[in-house]
Amino acid sequence: MSSHVVVIDATARRATIKTTPTKHLTDILQEACSKLGYNSSQYGLKHNRKQLDLSLSFRLSGLSSGAKLELVQASRSPSVVTVGLQLPESEARGAPNGRILDKFPSTTTLWLVLRKFEAGVAGSGLTRNFTSRAVPVTDDGESSGSLYYEAPVLQILERKLSSFTDLQKSLAQLGFNSGNVLIRLSFRRTEQRIEEAMLEIGEFFKSEEDDTPAQDKSGAPTVDPTEVKTEEPVQQLSAATQPEPSSVAASEPVTPPPTTLEPATSTTESGRTITVFSPPSEDTPSSAQIAYNENDYIPSIEHAQLHQRLLNESSRNQRLPTHAEMAAKAKEEEAKQAAIREVDVKVRFPDQSQVVAKFGTSDTGQSLYEFVRSCLAPPFANEDFSLTVHTASRSQHTSAIPSSEKRRLIKDIGLTGRVLVNFSWAENAASFVHERRTETLRPELRSQAQQLKVEQPPEPKEQETVPQPGPSSAQGDAKPSGARKSGAVPKWLKLGKK
């Protein structure tokens, strides 16, 4: 007898699904939902009231033949999954141990994961080519001039996914709703020309057109000729092979982000692009002008429960990390730090003007001081000053940035992401630099400065209070039998006559 399981929904309907040892639980879920008329992306499986890991195969799930599985509704809010992409040697440049990591919602498809990694939006920030590769076909060592599509192949545990249909599956559909997942990437040459493959990709993944940065109007990835592995020049695709824009319209409308005024940028003599913001025009801070609701500061029952839970967790004894765990954590932090290529540094001056610039891995504390000094007006350029940075760690503190050519900003000082640096004059500086509202920037920088506009959050909608159902007037007027009048003495308290 062949192995099978029985899937039962909330209405006691049953679906018998045949299984094999290598069949994954996600495939069992999809077949059961197809028979019962449900959307598989909104449901999961339970066995003996225990949630099943859908990424496992039937052999590794611990289920026996004839097991009864419950079809339960999954959480509608996507969870976070840490995806590690193991790269082949040809694409492992700039990736520690040939692997790039990032976090994605569980509703993200495999194709979109590849697109975000290759565009540098996720991972190490370097641009690569995973989805639009082409290789020439050679006959007896001579190139025929034709380019064929080289498709990505993803290996997740014991499963290999390479077809466009498989790459349309999300992480949740493969059973990954939390935790970590390692995907091994490789490539295989297909018998399909690159032009045909691009058209087919545009049809399969046109709904994800606005989610990826490097796509053309057809929704297909643009082919970078420098990434094509060939010794001969690559011929560009003709306009006749491109589909009509109307025929590949996105299936779902995408709401564009709110438009904001982009600040003006300029380039310094050293080639560094900077952005300048002028001081605020009013003395009152903008944060003090925002109206607030007093009810926001009243703790709710949920806040009290959360506080109580945190107190209970902090009172429990916790095992200290071992030396191996501390070494692994330190190594992971070093890998994250080594993957950073540049940081955005915003310098705030005493007159509240701000200058933003990018700094790379080779920039040191001395180069930051030289850049800030180049922004000062001539009367202030020879005065001493200091730069401090505020760390957002648990032990929040302000540390000074040393003006040393041996301390690099990213590797040694530990700057990451977007950093706010505060400018302050030294104690031995001249007295005129401490005057209020003294314009410290050069005139050419002040002329191109723009007002920093902070977008206010939308006002929360007032929730309509639903009146609680109370007793009717008839019930309110009527008094229950045996009820005593207000102010009357109860019978048990009265003293009997002797």
Image (cartoon, helix red, strand yellow):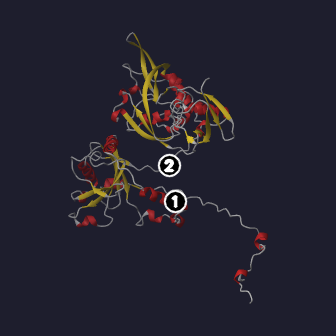
Total marks shown come to 2
Q: Nearer the viewer, residue 78 or 28?
A: 28
Are the two marked residues, 1 and 2, in contact with CB atoms closer than 8 angstroms?
no
Name the mark on residue 305.
1
In the image, residue 235 sits, relative to residue 397, either above or below, namely above
Query: Which residue is pictured at 60% across the width and 61% down the height?
Result: 462
Q: Residue at the front extreme?
A: 498
Q: Position of residue 332 (x, y in %)?
A: 34, 42
Dot 1 or dot 2, earlier in sequence: 2
Q: Nearer the viewer, residue 419 or 145?
A: 419
Taking the image as shown, residue 371 lies to the left or right of residue 19, namely left
From the image, which quarter does the N terminus lie in?
Answer: top right
Taking the image as shown, residue 331 lies to the left or right of residue 3, namely left
The residue singled out by tag 2 in the image is 259
| C-alpha span from label 1 to label 2 | 40 Å
From the image, which quarter does the C terminus lie in?
Answer: bottom right
Residue 324 lies in quadrant: top left
